[in-house]
Amino acid sequence: MSSLSSRFASESANVSDSAGATGPAGTVASFAPVTPPPRLRLSDMVYEQLETMVVEGRLAPGSALPSERDLAQQMGVSRPSLREALLRLESRGLIVGRAGGGYLVANASQPLLAEPLSQLMSRHSKTVDDVLEMREVLEAKAVELAAQRATPEDIARLGQALEALEAAYAAGRDGLDGEGDARGQSLLTRVPELDAHFHLALAEATHNLVLVHLMHAIFELLRGSVVDNYRAIVGHGADLAELVDQHRRIFNAVASHDTASAQRSLREHLAFIRNNSGDPVDPRAESPQKTV
């Protein structure tokens, strides 16, 4: 071996022994110093935890945060650190102060989506069909995902929403024929609202964050549409009991994780609405008198 080759081999061996690692084509790997991340302030960590809970839907729009004292105790932080995080969340529009103190989780996207659409619907009757088409697109996927992903807790919440809907319908159905009867009025207001909440709970069972936030954003639009649908269905003399019972079939399919049955039940539900909700007819309005 030549002296040059011997020297190269000796130096290479020394480098390998001292470095302990090689790079591509046998070159010595170069390692940069490890710099620890900068320390986060306690208020930053509190903010990140609460922000994550809002984004993931664990803090639902409209829900109230615990009192400042209770929340600080639960999170094991000082009230000044918590207060700083809450003020930051409020400035970002993620929470809003409420009368009397405390905070509510905001629904930041609702004014951007629901209010302009509601105004549009009030001026153009065609948008009633457009909302139904939108539901056919969104809820078809939602019921599929819910049947696949719903946890026992999701199923329990969906069951509670269904029981509330069925109870309100049972309480209101006998009063529909009574002029000005509060029970009949409840059938056309409270029951549709609970119907909309059932569909919102269905979306929450998908565990798709974007879909959940979108459904919360358009909830008022959905609720108003459902109210109009109920009035039209009753005005056309369709079987409202069948409409309510369709929710039971959707629930049973989701609770059984039967995707095909859940999708079929939802399609039948929306088809029933489409077939029986033409121009709304006031069920309390008197029939027009025939001229002789």
Image (cartoon, rainbow, N blue to C red):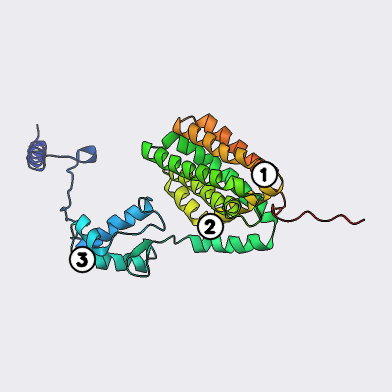
Q: Nearer the viewer, residue 28 or 56?
A: 56
Query: Amino acid type of disc 3?
Result: Arg
Contact, mark 3 vs mark 2 (Cβ under 8 Å): no
Secondary element at image label 3: helix
Q: Position of residue 176 (x, y in %)?
A: 63, 49
| Left or right, residue 280 beside residue 172 | right
| Left or right, residue 192 beside residue 67 | right
Q: Which mark is residue 162?
A: none
Residue at 49% in and 49% down: 197
Query: Amino acid type of disc 2?
Result: Glu
Secondary element at image label 2: helix
Contact, mark 2 vs mark 1 (Cβ under 8 Å): no
Q: Position of residue 91 (x, y in %)?
A: 36, 69
Give the residue pinned by disc 3: 79
Q: Is residue 206 visible?
A: no
Q: Nearer the viewer, residue 224 or 242?
A: 242
Q: Badge 2: how crowded within 10 Å, few (<14), some, or many (20+)?
A: many
Q: Going from the N terminus, do you reach mark 2 or mark 1 first?
A: 2
| Quadrant containing the C terminus in the rendered view | bottom right
Measure how far apart labels 3 and 2 are at the Cα level.
35 Å
Give the residue pinned by disc 1: 274
Query: Amino acid type of disc 1?
Result: Arg
Measure how far apart labels 3 and 1 are at the Cα level.
53 Å
Measure how far apart labels 2 and 1 are at the Cα level.
20 Å
Give the residue pinned by disc 2: 220
Q: Position of residue 37 (x, y in %)?
A: 19, 57
